[in-house]
Amino acid sequence: MKIKTFSKNSMGQNIYLCWCENSGEGVLIDAGCNEADEKAVMQTINDNSIIIKAILLTHGHYDHITGAAKMKALTNAPIYCHISEKQMLEDPDVNLSHRILNKISIMPDGLFNDGDVFLFGDATLKVLHTPGHTPGGVCYYDADGSNLFSGDTLFASSIGRTDLPMGDHHKLIRNIKTKLLTLPQDTVVYPGHGGTTTVGREKSGNPFINL
């Protein structure tokens, strides 16, 4: 599976384009795109003849969904989120877009649950429900390639904030410990903000996780 990261936006959120080179099928993980991100993503899609099968959201905060409707229109791909995140996507007060001029409300095309799997070509992403940052926050795990897309659950030397509405610190820590730090230690972590890390590095040195 090929992975390319885009982050030209002012909030620093990462947008991940993943695709199977054999089939040309791919997915977009989070769509917090500004115009520069949109152009860069579409350039890569067109250059590699990628067919986007789905836009997968890790959670519904506005910085991760601000370009979702536009990317759906450009790629004709359905938007998916965890069933517990549907309200957040639809309600600008809950997804915090009411804080900016452009209130965002998105109706997801599909809902998934913990353990569900997305297939595109030879690639597989498994949904790991990791509530705490938000009720429907998830990570996507690529076991074959040893990659984890952690959204705002886990960062390099940090964790997602839990002081926002519906955040739960204890749930977040428990899910990080039981669902993420139990993965192979060489698993590469692609977070919602900032640079990559590994499960082993976070297990041994993340100051926010009391092991």
Image (tube, grey):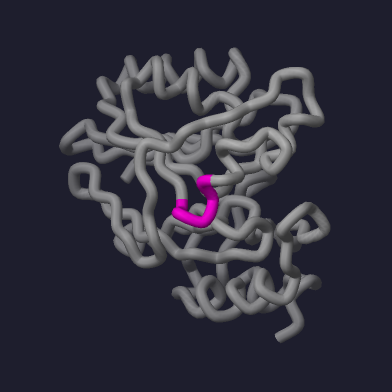
Which residues are the magenta region? 82-86
Q: Residue at x 22, y 31 (%)?
A: 24
Residue 1: image location, x then y, percent: 31, 45
Give left or right: position of 68 versus 141.
Answer: right
Residue 75: image location, x then y, percent: 35, 20
Q: Residue at x 30, y 61 (%)?
A: 144
Where is the C terminus found, in terms of image quarters?
bottom right
Quadrant of residue 156 within the rendered picture: bottom right
Give left or right: position of 7 versus 43.
Answer: right
Q: Residue at x 56, y 56 (%)?
A: 137
Residue 15: image location, x then y, percent: 54, 35
Quadrant of residue 136 within the rendered picture: bottom right
Query: Per the image, is 182 magenta?
Result: no
Residue 79: image location, x then y, percent: 40, 35
Residue 174 vs 60, above or below: the answer is: below
Residue 101 vs 199, above or below: the answer is: above
Residue 133 vs 11, above or below: the answer is: below
> Looking at the image, which residue sits at the far bottom?
211
Q: Nearer the viewer, residue 211 or 69?
A: 69
